[in-house]
Image (spheres, grey):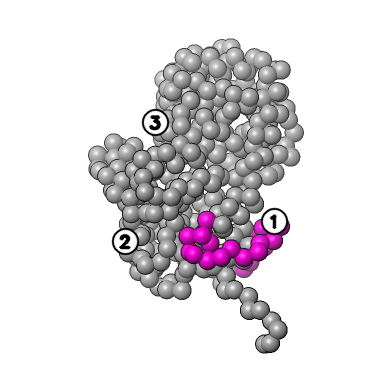
Amino acid sequence: MTGRTARPRPLRVLHLGFEDPLMPGAGGGSVRTREINRRLAGLGLDVTVLTTRFPGCADGVREGVRYEHVGMGRGANRLTRLLGYVALLPRAVWAHPDADLVVEDSLPPFSSMAVPLWTRRPVVGMVQWLHAREKARQYRLPFHLVERAAVRTHRRLITVSEGIAERVSAMNPAAEVEVIGNGVDQTLFAEPAQLGRDVLCLGRLELEGKGLGLLLQAWAAIESRIDGDLVIAGGGPDEDRVLHLARRLGIAHRVRFAGWVAGPDKAALLAASRVVVVPSRAETFGIVAVEALAAATPVVAFDIPCLREVVPHTCGRLAPPFDVDALAAEVANLYSDPARLLAFGAAGRAFAARFNWDDLARRQADVYHSAAHRPRPELPSAPQPVPLEART
């Protein structure tokens, strides 16, 4: 073919992503799996995701990305999904000898399977989850020791926040760490800016980790000063305990449970709320806070690593960590100040605009090409996500 230059072969990425985005109850990590990978496919990368089995799962191509499910049986519960995935993942990786790069997502309860020890291909660790110490306290098993040892096997890592970057760098000072945050759904910016009535908490229902116990105590102190209700949206393991605590505190009549929300319903709920509270004891990014700001709704949270990165003082308020009285005061004071609410909403929307999936995907593509020692090809001016394809 004289006179023609052969096009380089696309970079082949094997992504070890614990949760399939289609799995019921999948968390924020699966959102990133979908949003980044479909854009990488639009940029010309060849991406295969090895993920866990769940009832009704099917291998196939979706939005230009191939999903293969690893495990035993139906994967009917979280424990069987985890055990089957951990047991069979190495064999599934070895079945893809043509991959140029392996990307290992962090996974609970121990964050990493030390993938660089059992593959000769370049590996990038994608750290979205780093709560092994909390899981160690919960289950009385040394998950945090496994996490520390496994993170130290990596030489190149991507984290979603500066707070997590500091933690992994302390575990592994030799690693090269790049911070690439999460993006937000751009439809949130189309929601009308408004002064809502209710106070919203959205996310996984956990009394401890997500701080719902602290929030309910704060709400009990201020509910008589608030016109609207406390709306709790989401699902999780502590749903019954959260409801029981609300009843014990005598505030159940001022707390509404909205259940799991997503898509347009989630966007409308965020925009229609007056204040969004993120009472978490620990976060790796704080996507709910950024989503609220994109919907022009101010945020109140605890002043902890990662959350302080995504709740600037111009967009919301931070209370001293786990101080229930301070959290209550911040919510009540902000709720009663319409001018400040509107100003915070406008500033929050401008701040959230930087969390754009297209830009983040291009940065991640650069890291992948560098880690695989492949020159980055000329990319289109903006990555075009591949349309949804029929499963094969």
Task: Say what amino acid the circle numbered 3 marks.
Answer: Glu
Q: Tag 1's secondary structure?
A: loop
Span colored in magenta: 367-390
Query: Residue tagged by mark 3?
Result: 208
Vertical side of 215 occupied by 25: above or below: below
Q: Nearer the viewer, mark 2 or mark 3?
A: 2
Query: Residue tagged by mark 1?
Result: 382
Q: Nearer the viewer, residue 249 or 112?
A: 112
Query: Residue tagged by mark 2?
Result: 117
Question: Seen in the image, is 117 located left or right of residue 203?
Answer: left
Q: CA distance from mark 2 to mark 3?
A: 34 Å
Task: Say what amino acid the circle numbered 2 marks.
Answer: Leu
Q: CA distance from mark 3 to mark 1?
A: 41 Å
Q: Residue at x 59, y 14 (%)?
A: 333
x and y percent of residue 103 in the render? 45, 59
Q: Earlier in the sequence, mark 1 or mark 2?
A: 2
How many numbered circles does the render carry?
A: 3
Q: Tag 2's secondary structure?
A: helix
Question: Seen in the image, is 58 located left or right of residue 7?
Answer: left
Q: Most prominent secondary structure in the magenta stretch?
A: loop
CB within 8 Å, label 3 to label 1: no
x and y percent of residue 331 in the render? 56, 19
In reply to whether residue 383 is colored magenta, the answer given is: yes
